[in-house]
Image: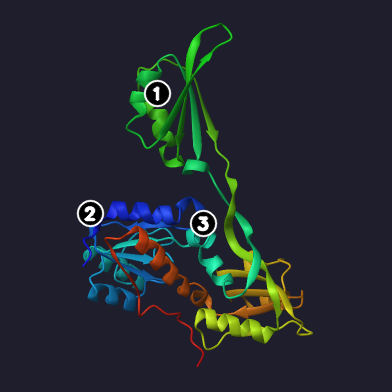
Amino acid sequence: MSSGMELGSVVKIIKQHAPTSLAESWDNVGLLVEPSSPHTVNTIMLTNDLTPPVLEESLEKKVDLILSYHPPIFSAVKRLSQGKWKDRLIIKCIENRIAVYSPHTCYDAKAGGVNDWLIGAFDTSNVVPVTNAEEIPGGYSHKVNILTKDSTNLQSVLSSLAVKQVSSPITTSSGEVMTVCSVLCNKCTLSEVFKAVEGSDCEVDTIENVKLEKIPVSGYGSGRYATLKQPLTPQEAVDAVKKHLNLLHVRLAAKPGNKYIKSVAVCAGSGSSVLRGVNADLYLTGEMSHHEVLDAVYSGANVILCDHSNTERGYLKQVKQELSEKLKDVNILISETDMDPLVIV
């Protein structure tokens, strides 16, 4: 029986496992439903999608936190009502004090994440991301440089804000010794920094706001590309994918000539935008449109489609193993009712 952990401590470890700074700008990741404190997490349920069957399973198994790969809250919410199925899920989570966390594109981009797992269907070498992830070191988006004679008082004024301060003395051209207080913060706290400085009695000479640029992170990013150690026929590639994903059926679009496959590019989920234009003999992803498949095939690539979540769900076993090593006082389950909505009949 697990002794449990406080929700904040659990979330901290989950973020260390896959930093939210790796997420795409359009995504909605992190803690999406937060019960009031105190909230002890004894059991976590891993799922690809939070659906009504998954929630019922979570209630039966007395789950305290659902980690849903896809975010059940994505766009802005103006009201929660019983009229929409996703609203009902969130309401029920709140009523039953179940926290909800989504990593989504953090898992897509991280080294050793879902795309590394997906390309593991093949015996490969030289695996690299298709596109590099970018992040700002430390996760801050702005740096406010404040030139002051009163650094001690200024640091005290800013100490209550969610910022990082770095101070260094300088000597001005007139020989006066002053301090540059650099405040690292996010966009949401930027206005608070200016308001705190302006509302204080600190003696400030100049204040400058610098927007920090993201830099590429080696080994992290969307999709994966690799060369195969041994060439495969399209059928051999299909067999390898079906075995790795534990599927009875996949869809294959074979390029004319049916030649051997020597290189592969993968993208879990919906990969057309990531894989478009990549020079590989095989594209492996969950879904692409009819015209995207035609374009890929007649540009020289084979295509294997497995349906969206089938290219992601198997990775949850790896997530369970990795998080279990870090969350030793928490019981981690994988949903038994989570499944792709599409089946071949």
Which of discs 3 and 1 lies nearer the camera? The answer is 3
The quarter in which the N terminus is drawn is bottom left
| Label annotation for residue 26 | 3
Label 2, on which residue? Answer: 36
Q: Residue at position x 61%, y 65% from top?
A: 224
Mark 3 / mark 2, whichever is N-terminal: 3
| Vertical order, 176 against 301 (above or below) | above
Q: Nearer the viewer, residue 325 or 156?
A: 325
Mark 3 / mark 1, whichever is N-terminal: 3
Farthest residue, direction bottom: 345
Tell me the CA gap for discs 2 and 1. Answer: 34 Å
Which of discs 2 and 1 lies nearer the camera? The answer is 2
Tell me the CA gap for discs 3 and 1. Answer: 33 Å
How far across and down, in percent of the image, does residue 127 sit? 63, 63
How far across and down, in percent of the image, does residue 226 sit? 66, 67
Label 1, on which residue? Answer: 198
Task: Name which residue type carries label 3.
Answer: Trp
Tell me the CA gap for discs 3 and 2. Answer: 27 Å
Q: Is residue 132 left or right of residue 344?
A: right
